[in-house]
Image: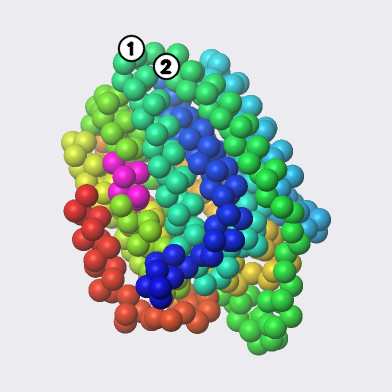
């Protein structure tokens, strides 16, 4: 009986309360899987330059994050989450219809900016809602399960769109339009499940028990996390607008290979996500965040030297554990240090900062790549920016060594290394 409980730390009552969360994320992720990963490739088909891809990625980074502060503060003040999730879901889903019929990269970028603005309503309120509905002792377990159904649903969407892209003409844009329309319909349907989540005010018990010294430590931990992540994400985001250029223009990937790249990454995450979640509940998010920063340092380095698609496939498999950590650990860390009455605001501040630096990082990378491409050619131009990203990530990872534990967890860093080794071994075995 005890063994059973350790395997499933969530009560039957809690599982029933979580079902609308799972359902919403499943349908919403299916919607996003049909469309989101293919927007940069759609832009490339429309003739986007490196600079335009940089702007596209920058707006996808900036607007979902920069507007979170007013939405998060308003949500905390009104003590409600669901209305923001429903309104944001409706607007962002409808924008897929307009994106489907965009006729130029500049129009596509504008539409993505509007969609990203709507998404900004949802991100801090969703994170705060999870903090209210999921107990502290098993956040890693529940968050990982939500991520797994989300990734699996997104993978199904990736495959459905991929089949259309693979079977369509090599340079056609219309093959993306039908999946985008389907994404709109599913995105609206996903909001229906939110009506089944009962409204509940955030508990204030945790705030009442926090001492002045503990509050100071939490604010310090939050500042550390924000500062270190701002630095890291600037250099991390420099990679994003250049990945399609390497994949399509350097390696020459066809439609099937592009789809397989997304599939491999999703399967790799699914293979380790639950183990990462259980591990987090034992050691806490701080240790895993530090590991994830170092694990993702080699990513731009691999893109710099990649000449075959299998190089990128292997990279996605190895990076799966790092992405699985990111999927849950930053959320858990923020929930650990945020006051109960300001949860959405803390997430909004954190994400707004990330949005600004990734906006600047993506735009800078696009223009730098264009500049060096004119001077030295495409491969060398991309290579220089990839090297800058690699060095910046390495320095940022070293900064993260100063990150403090968010609270006391059953195990420490000395206990975690053998477990991480087993998880990585499992990921390689897939």
| 330 relative to 318 in the view: left or right | right
| Residue ID at (68%, 82%) | 210
> Which mark, residue 169?
1
> Helix or strand or loop: what does disc 1 sit on?
loop
| 159 relative to 88 in the view: left or right | left
**Residue 51 in the image, given as x and y percentages of width and height:** 46, 32
The quarter of the displayed image where residue 338 is located: bottom right
From the viewer's perspective, is residue 275 above or below residue 352? below
| 425 relative to 56 in the view: left or right | left
Foreground pick, 101 / 141 = 141
Neighbor class of circle 2 (other Cα within 10 Å; few <14, some 14-19, many 20+) is: many
Foreground pick, 144 / 18 = 18
| Residue ID at (33%, 12%) | 169
> Which mark, residue 175?
2
Q: Are marks 1 and 2 in contact (CB under 8 Å)?
A: yes
| 254 relative to 187 in the view: left or right | left
The quarter of the displayed image where residue 113 is located: top right
Magenta region: 264-270
> Helix or strand or loop: what does disc 2 sit on?
helix
Q: State the CA–CA distance, disc 1 to disc 2.
A: 8 Å
From the viewer's perspective, is residue 99 above or below residue 385? above
Neighbor class of circle 1 (other Cα within 10 Å; few <14, some 14-19, many 20+) is: few
**Residue 181 in the image, given as x and y percentages of width and height:** 54, 21
| Residue ID at (72%, 69%) | 203
Foreground pick, 330 / 150 = 150
């Amino acid at each position: 009986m005890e063994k059973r409980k350790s395997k499933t730390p969530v009560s039957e009552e809690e599982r029933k309360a979580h079902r609308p969360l799972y359902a919403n994320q499943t349908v919403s992720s299916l919607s996003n899987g049909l469309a989101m990963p293919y927007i940069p490739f759609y832009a490339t088909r429309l003739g986007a330059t490196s600079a335009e891809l940089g702007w596209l990625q920058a707006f996808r980074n900036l607007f979902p994050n920069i507007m979170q502060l007013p939405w998060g503060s308003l949500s905390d003040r009104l003590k409600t989450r669901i209305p923001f999730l429903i309104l944001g879901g409706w607007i962002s889903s409808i924008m897929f219809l307009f994106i489907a019929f965009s006729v130029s990269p500049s129009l596509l970028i504008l539409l993505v900016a509007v969609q990203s603005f709507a998404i900004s309503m949802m991100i801090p309120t969703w994170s705060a809602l999870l903090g209210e509905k999921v107990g502290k002792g098993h956040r890693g377990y529940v968050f990982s399960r939500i991520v797994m159904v989300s990734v699996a649903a997104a993978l199904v969407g990736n495959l459905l769109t991929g089949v259309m892209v693979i079977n369509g003409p090599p340079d056609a844009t219309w093959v993306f339009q039908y999946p985008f329309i389907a994404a709109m319909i599913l995105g609206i349907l996903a909001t229906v499940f939110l009506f089944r989540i009962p409204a509940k005010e955030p508990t204030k018990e945790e705030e009442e028990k926090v001492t002045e010294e503990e509050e100071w430590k939490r604010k310090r931990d939050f500042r550390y996390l924000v500062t270190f992540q701002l630095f890291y994400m600037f250099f991390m985001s420099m990679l994003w607008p250049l990945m399609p250029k390497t994949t399509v223009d350097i390696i020459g990937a066809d439609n099937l290979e592009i789809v397989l790249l997304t599939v491999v990454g999703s399967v790799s995450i699914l293979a380790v996500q639950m183990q990462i979640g259980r591990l987090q509940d034992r050691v806490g998010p701080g240790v895993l965040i530090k590991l994830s920063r170092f694990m993702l340092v080699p990513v731009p380095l691999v893109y710099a030297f990649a000449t075959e698609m299998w190089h990128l496939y292997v990279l996605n498999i190895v990076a799966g554990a790092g992405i699985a950590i990111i999927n849950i650990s930053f959320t858990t860390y923020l929930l650990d240090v945020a006051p109960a009455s300001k949860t959405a605001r803390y997430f909004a501040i954190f994400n707004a900062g990330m949005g600004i630096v990734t906006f600047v990082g993506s735009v800078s990378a696009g223009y730098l790549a264009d500049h060096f491409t004119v001077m030295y050619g495409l491969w060398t131009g991309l290579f220089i920016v990839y090297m800058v990203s690699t060095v910046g990530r390495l320095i940022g990872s070293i900064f993260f060594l100063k990150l403090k534990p968010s609270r006391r967890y059953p195990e420490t860093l000395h206990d975690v290394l053998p477990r991480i080794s087993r998880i990585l071994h499992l990921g390689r075995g897939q």
